[in-house]
Image (cartoon, helix red, strand yellow):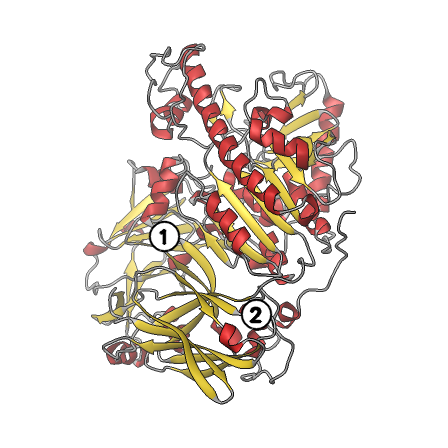
Amino acid sequence: MPRSFPPRPLAAGAVLLGLLAACGDVVAPVGQTAFLPGESVFDHLDRVRIDSWSTELLPPDVRAAVAAPAETWRLDAPAEDWKRRREMTAQEAQLAALPGNPAFWSLNLSGLADAPPGRPSVVHRGQRLGALDGEARIATLPGEQIWWDEDAATIFVLDAEAAVLFAVCEQAPGDTALLYGSVVDDRLLAAAHRPATAHGLEQRGTLGRVSRRALRLPAPGRLVLSVPLARVDALSVAVGLPDEGRRVEQGHLVEAPGCSDGVLVAVDVTAGGRTTRAWSMALQPGEGWVEATVDLSPWAGQDVGLALVSEPGPAGDAAFDLVLFADLRLLGKPRRLPDRPHVILVDIDTLRADRIGCLGAAGDPTPRLDRWANRRATIFTDTTATASWTLPSTASMLTGLAVHQHGVDRFPRGLTEDSLPLATVLSRAGYDTLGMCEGGFVMPTFGFDVGFDSYDYRTHRDPDWDRALEWVSERRSEQPFFLFLQTYMVHAPYAPPVAVGDGAPGAYAGVLAGHPVSWERVLAPFNEGQLELDEADRRYVTRAYDAGVARMDDELGGFLEGLSRQFSPDDVVIIVTSDHGEELFEHGGLEHGRTLYDEVLRVPFLAQLPGRRGGTRVREPTSTLDIVPTVLDAVGLPVPSGLPGRSLLRELPAYRGRVAAHRDGRRSIQFDGFKLIEPPPDRPDLEPELFDLQADPGEQRNLIARQPDKLRALRERLRRFETDHPPAAVGAAQAGEMDDETRSTLKALGYLGDVDR
């Protein structure tokens, strides 16, 4: 009999989260309900007391500068001093190509009289703009700072090294001034302030390309948690020390790495009036996250006080000693199964549906995935994505919202907590949440770490799914888990295929032989008409893509087989899908993000669902919008009524409108075997396209002149879909700042040549 998972209320800690923020310190009474194995301290922050708090985070010179009245200098920038740029770098061209911003302007700051040193802020149309800093939506270069005036549709970019201010807008930005003065580091001020309760300590901490839910604590500092150790015997913890030093330079706070002399972090246990140090280590900035498991077995069954402790380093200097405590789970031997099934979502970026054997691919391209699907999964044969590039499509996949609803429809926008991504919903229901991805457009910069206890976004193209299996198998928890895995294994650059000829390895000897099929070398030149590829070249490109599919099958197959050895089908929901496909010359181009044809919208969708027999084929139309409602339904959580997707555990209609969006405003809708690609209202130069997908699956014959009634009907259905599912009340967020490694990754993936892909 399959297990049943009826709807349950959220965990008590999740319900209380935020309600106690206005209260004083709370001390949990001895003898309260014991923790269950795997429960997170973050779900019980009302039981955490701030026992001591350092006021020495800022050294005297920084403290004095912060306390002093801000002295400011305002320098006007006349419109005639702005110079319109005729020759632009690739990044400048990206900015100038943004909707409504056709011109790129520059202003030489060194030419302004009496300009003091330091970075200015911008005053535009009489209003001071807030610098975006770590929340910039533009791919910044090192040393750049960005402002965005939404009302005036103007982007400002400061290149401090070159002393040049850039503006992207239609006309030279009049009524613009630069404001210099003492700069207060709001992050340091916030960190130095003692919050009313432990809820105020929570933040996301990013170290070594891993983003974690964390508690921040200065040194010296001490947090105490009352814990009845009835069923737990260890505490997992991850600690890190950000290198956030600052110094005062000519009235400004500037970054000064290396100001901290390190910290001592420790866990103390108090029982029977006696305090014992159970674990400690010296920690230095730059070490990233350090993980440990603290043995609590000597105090098994007792009511104890656990203390998270931070102390200054060997020099005794507490300046910039801001420790992050993450993970924080109480572990024990599970005595029962979780009350909900686990959830695993696997996103194989750029994987076409027609490359999967069980979805009709010729030959035997994915034998391991096919074996798993035929034994364990429901095979959905007609699934479409919501966009043809990663950022908006993955946002839909994780929120259940259509692109026009979540608003993450162009670079540089990102998800917010208020959009309630799947990780947030499951975390509030008591799930452990782990994300492992390969950077690019799914990194925390764009909000994809929201809701995850830990989000590992190391930029590599060899997924470490053995580590994911280890994490799954080594958990000492009665809590269910949500695991999100994403890989660019199939994405360009495609590695050279092993066999590149007509059945004979090495037979191909064209211009591409032995080279990866990369954005710079092949995709961009071909799409721009600068590279010609003959039939042999095109076969090489296609086989290089297919070689990535084969590598994916081997990696993913091993991972799924490992899961099958650990879990019964009813104990874990597994969904394998993709954010979009890939064009391989079908409409004259390569890669994705350029069109809304089926080669970039049709994706695989294989789902292991409780109570469903493996190998079942479902031919009714489905969408990646169905992921969130299906998961919530499968684990017994309520499905929000406003989501446009459907639970695939319920009866599906034979006909259904499925909508996708393009970055330039085009939208497509499929219904009843037809597909309409509708141009945006402001592009009268673009003609709508209408295809009969049954008679013309390759979408080569536009029927708008022959089928006016069908055109009107699909337009009305598209309008009704967008009306019935209005944009979410919470908008997209400003995306975060990119570091050099992330920029390098995006460049390798082809995304910095055309950021909106």
Q: Is residue 295 left or right of residue 623?
A: left
Residue 536 image point, x, y percent: 41, 11
Residue 5 numbered tag: none
Residue 580 image point, x, y percent: 55, 34
Is 219 located above or below residue 659 in the figure? Answer: below
Residue 156 numbered tag: 1
Q: CA distance from mark 1 to mark 2?
A: 54 Å
Q: Name the one closer to the observer, 11 or 162.
A: 11
Task: Name which residue lies at 61% across and 59% down.
Answer: 431
Which element is circle 1 on? strand
Task: Name which residue lies at 69% across and 51% down.
Answer: 632
The answer to which of marks 1 and 2 sits earlier in the sequence is: 1
Q: Amino acid at mark 1?
A: Phe
Which element is circle 2 on? loop
Residue labelled with disc 2: 232
CB atoms of marks 1 and 2 within 8 Å? no
Residue 307 image point, x, y percent: 46, 78
Q: Quadrant of residue 684?
A: top right
Q: Name the one closer to the observer, 370 or 118.
A: 370
Q: In the displayed orientation, state which residue is furthest to the bottom.
A: 273
Q: Name the one closer to the observer, 306 or 51.
A: 306
Q: Amino acid at mark 2?
A: Val
Q: Is residue 275 left or right of residue 686?
A: left
